[in-house]
Image (spheres, helix red, strand yellow):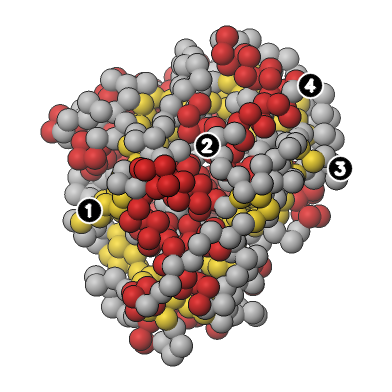
Amino acid sequence: MGRYSDAFAAARDDRETFWLDAAGAVDWVSAPTHALDDADAPLYRWFPDATLNTSYNALDRHVDAGHGDRTALIWDSAMVGEVRTFTYAELLDEVSRFAGVLSAADVSAGDRVVIYMPMIPEAAIAMLACARIGAVHSVVFGGFAAPELATRIDDAEPVAIVTASGGLEPGRTVEYLPMVEKAVELAASPPATVIVKDRDEITGSAADHAGWLDWDAEMADAAPAGPTTVAATDPLYILYTSGTTGKPKGVVRDNGGHAVALTWSMRNIYDIGAGDVWWTASDVGWVVGHSYIVYGPLLVGATTVMYEGKPVGTPDAGAFWRVVADHKVAALFTAPTAIRAIRKADPDALELGKYDTSTLRTLFAAGERLDPDTFEWAGATLGVPVVDHWWQTETGWAIAANLRGLEPMPIKAGSPTVPVPGYHVGIVDAEGKQLGPGEEGNIVIELPLPPGTLAGLWRDEERYRKSYLSAFDGYYLTGDSGYVDADGYVVVLGRSDDVINVAGHRLSTGSIEAVVASHPAVAECAVIGIHDDLKGQRPSGYVVLKAGADIEADTLRGELVALVRNEIGAVATFRDVTVVPALPKTRSGKILRKTMRQIADHEEYTVPSTIEDPDVLADLAKQLGG
């Protein structure tokens, strides 16, 4: 690991030089003369004396360099059967004009703008337009209920909301405008401006609401706005992530560190540069969509694919392979959930054979644990490296990865490989004592975090310190548990609260899940810890069978119990197996394990606002008698 080791050591031992060198890939109005301001540690600021504009770096500079005719964005909607393509020059024109629309609506630098949009190009255009005038965008996942939207409005206090008439999903439409109207009514400080992009497929428009503005009408008369210079430390966006108290946490991302980190990551982690076609199959409402649908690929001059559709059902399990073939995608980044969904519907990958996916070099996975069984199936099926990596909304880019552009490393199933340069990962026990190779504990990151990570929580420094910095002095608490093996590879076993205590033995539900998922009949599974009068807790498994799997429930249970006993040991006391038609998940693909635990233990629970399909949770509660 020569090149990696050199880069990691440089970022650790001389971070000033390392990150100033990385900053050379960004176009600055005033270039940084030093990298890190630690005067207010443990609150750090990157490139404190520099100024720039993120939108300029994502668009103008490529056009100015003569690459205006290169494709910047491909919008592929399986929902409406339409493809729209934007060159860098065309996308710059759209962004500049919408920046003019915002300016005409009295939105200025530092103001917040809530973006509540489906997966349409206007979502990315609105984000980049905010960045262009120095406004701070806060993208809220389209389809969030009105109370959740109102909560975010009250916290961010936006001067404008940018929305659309609705989103499209297989078999249904989601009307946004009634939810926006209700949220504005509920909000203590409603925004003065609402701008609506009408979609022909959905009823309702700006005209139905007094004072609301129509996107297309405003764009027709808009004067383009140029890039506003902002400080590198000024906020680019606020992105809300769920908090343990129920109140969402507003993660703040700055402009300068973000541009440097994402530019570095595209080249060194993903091996993607100018002209490459890159597809992140996520949503702009999540951090993955921010970093790697919108900003990352455009910062390096790549072509980014935005997909409106599902991995299966739009129209079938070949949907992803069609997109790869049609647009000659070089690398795909998606969540393991999507791969499992495809595998469940098409276990023999018959749909894959209908498409030429020879341009695909790499499949990247993140967002949840990539179990070894899914990893092996995807690799064997696609014939390309399947590369797990691990990060969080808070970090904005990978903590641990297999750096394909810097130095590809041997891949180990179940591990996202090694800490990325700039991240100093440690494993500590409950008292903060450093643990050795293979010893499981809390995963922490030594401060300071590298550029591009959270600058704090929006207007809540105390909560930032309490949530992330106070548990172990000098470290950022990831909230995940795992270990580092003898080769320096990180293994993430799951959230710390997914570690269960069975008669004094700490067991990771992630470890048990990996064994259960290896059974040939299992498409997907979740293992949770439920109350046990004797042992305190015991593991309980919930499995979704592969399409066409023909096995009796008792037979499956016996085989899974034996597997876990053989792989983990009798200490796991694994004996509960429930076959379910589907697992309850958030819209970003995370399994709702906490809610499942509450149902199984017959505790009161609330249906999370982020849930993908409430009926799945209701059916599970009925099945478990909750």
* First reached walking from the N terminus: tag 3 or tag 4: 3
Residue that mark 2 sits on: 263
**Count of number-bearing discs:** 4
Compared to residue 163, the image places residue 421 above or below, namely: above
What amino acid is labelled 2 in the image? Thr
What amino acid is labelled 4 in the image? Gln
Judging depth in this view, the residue of 277 and 608 nearest the camera is: 277
Asked whether residue 69 appears in the rendered view, the answer is yes
> What SS does tag 3 mark?
loop
Q: Quadrant of residue 393?
A: top right
**Given this view, does label 3 or label 1 mark the residue nearer the observer?**
3
**How far is mark 3 from mark 4, CA to CA?**
27 Å
Residue that mark 1 sits on: 83
Name the residue located 58 percent from the left edge and 60 percent from the top edge.
Answer: 228
What amino acid is labelled 1 in the image? Val
| Cβ atoms at labels 4 and 1 below 8 Å apart | no
Residue that mark 4 sits on: 434
Residue that mark 3 sits on: 39
* First reached walking from the N terminus: tag 4 or tag 1: 1
Judging depth in this view, the residue of 443 and 576 nearest the camera is: 443
**How far is mark 4 from mark 1, CA to CA?**
52 Å
